Image (spheres, grey):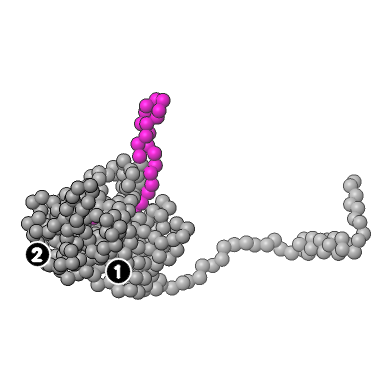
Amino acid sequence: MKKLFILATPARLAVVSLFIAGTILALDREPLQAVPRVVADRGPLAAGERQTIKLFESASPSVVYITTVRVGRDRFSRNLFEIPQGTGSGFIWDDQGHVVTNFHVLRGAQIARVMLDDQSVWEAKLVGVSPDKDLAVLQIEAPREVLHAIPIGTSDDLKVGQKVLAIGNPFGFDHTLTTGIISGLGREIQSVAGRPIQDVIQTDAAINPGNSGGPLLDSGGRLIGVNTMIYSPSGVYAGVGFAVPVDTVNRVVPELILHGKVVRPGLGVKIDDYLNERLGIEGVIVRGVLRRSAAERAGIQGIRWGHFGRYQLGDVIVAIDDEKVSDSDDLFNILDKRKIGETVKVSLENDGRQREVSLELQAID
């Protein structure tokens, strides 16, 4: 028989006494019972919650999950293999299978696949891109019964403070809903092409990597923007997200479907940002005029070059329809709001003299 030896220090005697007492008490008590707690009645969901749930369930079938890959070739076997490129979000534009997303979601990819709400996956064809607006259109050959086009709203009457909802696939988690408000309007951000995107919507609805290309919705479930960018020192959500306004989307997407690119209205001139910066001239220097263009017909003059690299400045564009033009960004922003065939008044300066000409905007690449 084994013997138990206990060193008789006061602290150890106290511990042993408690242990023995607890054992005796445990032998005398009935066995403990552990059962699930009774579920408390919470009552009906709040009206706001029911509305958000209904909106999410209604809009989700329009939102898609996009994966992109590049194709590589094994240097030894020469076999082709796929290299994952990235993921993003998008939404169904119409019952012809057109899908809208951000240009930067597809940039550098050779293959794009679209997963619909029913988990079916479809190979996508690139229809058109607009790097200047960070927009792109894909097309899938899916049955019309699974193509749920998203309702379109307007960004013209938005108000700071109104509720917005973002649906997307952040970090690969498909159909994630975040909510917030419009934090600001009329913002300007740089597109991946370096051109400014105007009238951008700022929101505090959580937008993270993978949300790009997904819809920003109003409380009526209508598309009001395409989530495109976040402002964050760490690269993840920091309370400031941006969306391309739907009025821009509704203007650009039909052109991408028809032409594969945006056919912009222009004057028919060549400009030179570097020369503008070097000379510190306010306005846009006309570097040259395209032959048989609207600018040539209106008599606009470009730089005249002489011997040994010497040149004489021609016209400088300082306003369009009395809207001031300080640089090329101003010029592009003004022309973005015009249409091909529209007549505009161009204010010019040349060697201290000012004049105005009228011309009909032409299509430019």
Task: Please give the name of the residue rendered at 40% of the width and 29% of the height, measured from the top-left corner.
Answer: 74
Helix, strand or loop for disc 2 = strand
Disc 2 vs disc 1: Cβ atoms closer than 8 Å?
Answer: no
**Residue farthest to the right?**
8
User: What amino acid is labelled 1 in the image?
Assistant: Gly
Residue 135 seen in the figure: no
Foreground pick, 244 / 293: 293
Kindly indicate the quadrant of the structure image that contains residue 170. bottom left
Q: Which residue is mark 2?
A: 358
**Horizontal placement of 57 versus 11: left or right?**
left
Task: Please give the name of the residue rendered at 20% of the width and 66% of the height, measured from the top-left corner.
Answer: 318
| Mark 2 vs mark 1: in front | 2
Which SS type dominates the magenta stretch?
A: strand
Q: Is residue 95 magenta?
A: yes
User: What amino acid is labelled 2 in the image?
Assistant: Ser
Looking at the rendering, the stretch of residues picked out in magenta corresponds to 70-96
Residue 126 at x, y percent in the picture: 25, 45
Between discs 2 and 1, the one toward the N terminus: 1
Kindly indicate the quadrant of the structure image that contains residue 21. bottom right
Question: What count of labels does the image hold?
Answer: 2
Foreground pick, 351 / 253: 351
Helix, strand or loop for disc 1 = strand
- The numbered mark at residue 56 is none
**Residue farthest to the front?**
307
**Residue farthest to the top?**
77
Task: Please give the name of the residue rendered at 79% of the width and 60% of the height, measured from the top-left corner.
Answer: 23
Q: Which residue is mark 1?
A: 186
Residue 88 at x, y percent in the picture: 36, 51
Kindly indicate the quadrant of the structure image that contains residue 151. bottom left
Foreground pick, 251 / 347: 347
Residue 351 at x, y percent in the picture: 18, 64
